[in-house]
Image (spheres, helix red, strand yellow):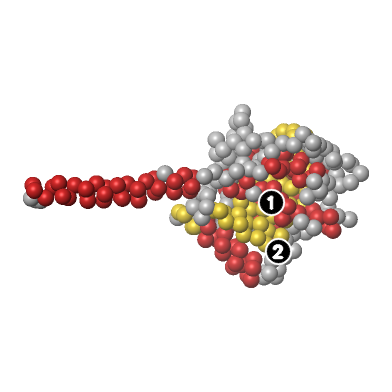
Amino acid sequence: MFPTSSIPRLFPAIVTLATALFVFMTPLHSASLKAAEKPYEHGPDSKPNAAHPQGKVTEHVLQDSNVFPGTKRRYSLYVPAQYTPEQPAALMVFQDGHAFTGNQGDFRVPVVFDNLIAKGLMPITIAVMIDPGHKAELPNKRGWKPTPANRSVEYDSVNGDYAKFLLTEVLPLIEKKYRITENPNLRAICGNSSGGICAFSVAWHRPDRFRKVLSHIGSFVDLRGGHNYPPMIRKTEKKPIRVLLQDGENDLDNRFGNWPLANRQMAKALSYHDYDYKLVFGDGGHDGKHAGTIFPDSLQWIWRGWKQETP
């Protein structure tokens, strides 16, 4: 116990200490956290520009599959305003297509494509935004719920089945109406999470058909053997593919693996064989916020030099 006579002398020191503690602690609970929570912001290429021609988006249904029997799915098709049958279009396929179709949200594919195509920063490109398969009746609304039962089988499996599905079942339907280039250098594929590893698998197994990969928060972990890709890359002769990997420092860490570490291991393996690759890290988690805001820049990197690759 302090002597009663000492309290008046101690009181100013106590107030000073309390004030110092308040000043020290306040930034941790306001400015610092607000800085950490500051959202990624979309740039001008992710916003509609009335001066640029606008492509058309249509929605379709694939009622069955030979590669993935018993599955149904929806997909959207973006066709740029500049497309003509006289010149085959470039191609870009997106897994979890419902996450890419809109003019709002993280990625805004139609808007970004309109802007970059108009500026000549990417080729005239048809986009196929396809959902994973359902083994029941399709829900009324596209999205994550109910979870498509066949998604992990299609996306996380380290084999060429999904590439076969695209090449033998999906693209032939589109090619009945539109001319798509046979040049693999003008064919790209993109996805998030399991869709990201799926994108890599397609190009890895069929570099004769797809050579550009954009993988966001890719699940290169032990879901269905994805953690084996880094050693496979190191032990296999270099393939003619270009890869952009995106992830966040706060991505998943669970019993299947650590996503940031897995993407760094992928980058190191690609570097070992001197692949044309890029690794972009943010501070986000397992979502599309960071990838969406850099999406126009990622596309420009993936498509750079496209004019020299056009016959």
- Name the residue nearer the viewer: 184 or 33: 33
- The circle drawn on residue 276 is 2
Quadrant (top left/top right/bottom left/bottom right) for the C terminus: bottom right
Most distant residue in the top direction = 140
Horizontal placement of 219 versus 7: left or right? Answer: right
Residue drawn at 61 percent across, 67 percent down: 269
Q: In this view, does 169 lie to the left or right of 197?
A: right
Amino acid type at image mark 2: Asp
Furthest residue to the right? 86
Q: Which amino acid does label 1 sit on?
A: Asp
Residue 224 % position (x, y): 55, 55
How many C-alpha atoms fall within 10 Å of the one at disc 1: few (<14), some, or many (≥20)? some
Q: Do the residues labelled 2 and 1 touch (CB within 8 Å)?
A: no
Residue 213 left/right relative to 81: left
Q: Residue 181: percent from the left, percent from the top?
A: 84, 50
Residue 290 is situated, as x and y percent measured from the top left of the image, at 58, 48
> Looking at the picture, does residue 183 appear above or below residue 125?
below
| Category of crowding for the residue at label 2, using alpha-carbon neighbours closer than 10 angstroms: few (below 14), some (14–19), many (at least 20) | some
Quarter occupied by residue 105: top right
Q: Give x and y (percent) for residue 198.
A: 64, 52
Instruction: Choose between 229 and 24: the one closer to the eye.
Output: 24
Residue wearing tag 1: 297
Residue at image coords 69%, 66%:
275
The Cα atoms of the two marked residues, 2 and 1, are separated by: 16 Å
Q: Which of marks 2 and 1 is nearer the N terminus?
A: 2
In the image, residue 206 above or below residue 232: above
